[in-house]
Image (tube, coloured by chain):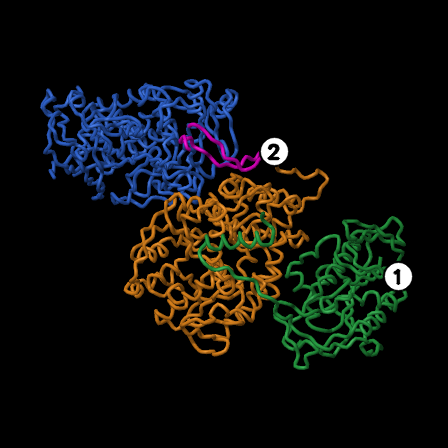
Amino acid sequence: MIDTNEVDVDALVIGGGIAGLQSAIDLANQGFHVLVVEKQPSIGGKMIGLSKVFPTLDCCSCICTPRMAEAEHHPNIEIMTYSEVRQIHRKNRRFLVGIVKKPRYVDEDKCTGCRLCEYACNTDLPHEFEGNLGVRKAIYVPFTNAVPQVALLDIDNCILCGRCEKACPAGAIDFLQEPENVHVRARAVIVATGYEMIPANFKKEYGKGQLRNVLTALQMERLLAPHGPYGRVLRPSDGKEPDSIAFVQCAGSRDHSAGVPYCSRVCCMYAIKQAMLLSGSLPLADLTIYYMDIRAFGKGFEQFFQNAKAMGIEFVKAKVARIGEDEQQNPVVRVEIMEEDGRVEERTHDMVVLSLGLVPAWNPRQAGLAAPADDGFITCVQPSLAPCRTPEEGVFVAGAAAGPKDIPDSIVEAGAAALEAAAYLRGLSSAANPAKSHRHETVEPSTVAGEEQ
Amino acid sequence: MVQPPAPEAELDLSFLEHLLASPDGEPILSCMQCGTCSGACPLGHAMEYPPRAMILQARVGDMSPVLSSPSVWMCVGCYTCTLRCPREIDLTDTLWPAVRDEALQKGMQPPAELQTAFQNLYMYGNVLGQSPRKRLKWADGLDVPVLDLTKNPQPVEIIWLVGCYPSYYPRNQVVSREFARILTKLEVSWGVLGVKEKSLGDCDRLFGEEGLFETLVESNNELFERHQFKELILLDPHSFRALQQFYPRYGVDIPAQHYVTYLAERIDQLRPLLQKPVNATVTYHDNCCVGRRCACFDAPRELLEAIPGISLVEMARNKDNALCCGGGGGGMWLDAHITEHGGHRLSDERIRQAAETGANVLAVSCPYELSRFEDSAKVVGVDDQLVVRDIIELLAESMGLSEKEKT
Amino acid sequence: MKIVVVLRQVPDLIEPLEIADSGTALDLDGASFLLNESDDHALEQALLLKESVGGTVTVVALDFGDVDNTLYAAAAKGADQIIKIPWENDMPPGPRTAADMYAEVIRAQEADLVMIGCQAHDELQGALGSIMAQTLKLPYLGVIRGVDPSEDPAFVEAFKEFPGAVKARMEVRLPAVLGVLAANEPPRYVPVSRIRAATKSTEFEERETAAEMLDQEITITRIYAPEVGERAEMLEGSESEVAERITEILLERGVLK
């Protein structure tokens, strides 16, 4: 373990997803120095893996990549990828943050992202970014538009053949890299740790995640993305083009039995969006959405839902009780059809998509911050009036870390968190230097930062 | 399928009110009509009014089409709907008994076999309609002493409530004798209630025969009060459940255990006694009450794995996702009703799943299951591959206490 | 329609019947009693008629065996009036004595229709209904398998089945006595909670009768368990031996050729 020297910043942003990047950019544009810590090897979070956004159907890559690039190139933003915040310790009005930079076994400064290592490697592994539907090498650039464009070596699955090392023109491969402890001093923290999807095996009766043609919604996002694993929508078990695709809504949301009593907010809309995109790519396929209620509450959402119905997507009010499969590995869903003379039926589809609920990705306790709320998301002390504030002064929250929300809401909240953080930072400076505490005065944050010690 | 009430019809919310007043009834208001219960129910496809639709009819105040439908008598008490409900509504123990009670109160007739079972319970205290005086017949010629506390009252550690099937049904009597030998071998201080023992009334409770249940609770309580003991041990998981969940509602709170947990607690004492290998590939069927409802999945497996020679394989559907045998909560007397109305015997489906594992023994821990699965094995035609044995029988065999060796 | 039903207690066959030391009677000391099955049908038929045309159902029973349970259950099912005739003996009365007692009580009821099971398993000749009818000077029709109301309220329609699958519908002028074998529907199940409620709310009317114990015209000379006849042959041996022996027997008896 290497201990590096302390780094001083105005604000630490935990999470380099769309919310974290937005907060960082908004703070940086005001002159604050920001450090973004991202646990994945690339920034971009969940959004960069999605196909399109609802309800406008803008391409996610097209609108997310510029933000990633902006953050990467911003003079006031420093980004640490493949790094995890281990501890946040408040000392006076400052946070001492312990970060572990995991070894990439590739020197970030030397790597040019040329991918020659990737082409040389002959170990094929399931690609996590593609929802394990595609294949990656043991050494790989995380994905096409990853930021930074730096390779990463999966040491657990590497056979240490040394081909990559020979292939690398920059001499960037370093098998001896070690985790690095980085000590950061920050005056404000924004938690933008986002969400994870509840694991597909959370409900035994949904096939324990072992039915091959039952996909998670994020896997379907990849199938629909322009640079997805197959380049088109095919079902995983046999590569067949599916004729009948069903969506199972509230798969792990609003469900006490799964431990997720809340509504995950985005599943209705992303399922409708996916169904719409599917009707574009597979015009003859039957598309069914099994739902409890359609919650189309946002701007343009209801119209989006009505359009989907008009397009012939079948909406069936029923929560799927069980998913099995037949001998051809076709998923079979057991549902109660509630319409006139309906009964409990078993319906066979070629493919089923679980609209999985959203669960928190990070527990603030593990870094020594205040415990999360009952639902596991970051506690907001004033959810109505100051939704970005947490129980700890100087710690703010943005995006899905505070609770499930969609991209526009995350971006709005990220801006709000940045604003709150900026006000807080300025408050700190005025307290430290009363002479400068004029309300309208422009503060040069980086100079103030030094004075406070 | 939802029958909108005629506009002029008076809405009758009395059933809903009755439901809400029952313990654990309140969450029924939180039902969001998602239909998980209906789809989760292994017999949901055969129900005109599955649980969701029943709740809807209760809310609209029009229960009459529900009460006269065969659906009322199709639940076999497997608790799957309850465990799957996203709102944690206690359907099995609250909704179903209430609907059935309402049906009975409104004069609807339960299926004939069930009526007979009720009448037998009312008149003789056992479901089989056997003479109460023959309660101890199972112990005839037994080679270990059975302390009949009715004749020789004295303080004991445990009272073993033998149960109806284990007392009377020849196939189960074998298991009873072996259990008696195991208890004796473990040097437990135990006794039985002899001719005074009565059914605990588990099935009537689930079947809405609340009055009958009350009668049995009262007489059982009177009986228990006459004896000094630490806890009750039962072979029947349904009775265990009744004691644990429903007796306390009548102020009768007695420590009780199903035999699998009781024996699993004594695994260290058992282990050295399990000498003889029982060479078999065994798959275990989780019963609904001890298994799914009480989430006790390890104890039976621990017992089976302690037996030398046994290799345990799991069915695809196991533990909390296990398929019910269809015999619970009165299901033993509903096969005809259920098959007549589009359902099937769940034990037939389950025995196929057991056979698919390649096991040659299906291990069970519930008195109903022995006869149900043995019958189903013959019906389905897997009886040449698979035998059905209670865990007690497998333990007894390994301990050299099995019936075969004794006769 | 005012209907009177006679309900009798018979020994429950769940326990083996014991023969008294005398060898000419049953020892009923340890026996338990229940409602006679065809009387149960008579009650059901009475309740069905009441539900279809209105009226009342009065139950008359001797205070014998576990009669109270039976009467509470009858009340729970819908009987309107319950009359109990005191009886102190260990054995039930013979049919002529019983007919006198019931008739005395029933006469005072001025019933339109009297129903009773057409037999009881301790009295297979089924005499009680007809003797009672004679005592009451009313017409009697026995072995009835269902009664429907008639368009003319002075009549009911009774059904009988004859050998050879022939059914007959009979108009019976009321008042009359019907000996019921089976009701239109099987006797109803009544939840125990109702019986428990009836136990608290039902009051029995007691009617002493002046009827005297009459001598039995029939004297029982011996009561005994059937003597074991030639026992069935148990086939032993392996499956194939048993199968072979079965085939032989079937051939011997001419079932197989």
Residue type beneath disc 1? Pro
Residues marked 1 and 2, same chain? no
Q: Is residue A329 magenta?
A: yes
**Where residue B127 sits: x, y (%)?**
56, 61
Which chain is mark 2 on? Answer: A
In the image, which lettered chain appears orange? B
Residue A391, given in percent of the width and then of the height, sits at 32, 43
Residue A442 belongs to magenta span: no
Q: Quadrant of the N terminus of chain C?
A: bottom right
Query: What is the tally of numbered marks visible in this picture?
Result: 2
Image spot of residue B118 (x, y percent):
60, 59
Identify which residue, A305 or A214, lies in the foreground.
A214
Q: Which chain does green denote in the image?
A: C
Q: Which residue is mark 1?
A: C139
Question: Mark 2 highlights which residue?
Answer: A340
Q: Is residue A1 left or right of residue A266?
A: left
Q: Is residue C14 above or below residue C165?
A: below
- How far across and how far down the image is residue A32, in percent? 23, 29
* Chain designation of label 1: C
SS for callout 2: loop
- Chain A's colour is blue
The label nearer to you, 1 versus 2, is: 1
The magenta span reads: A327-350
Q: Is residue C133 left or right of residue B375?
A: right
Q: CA distance from mark 1 to mark 2?
A: 55 Å
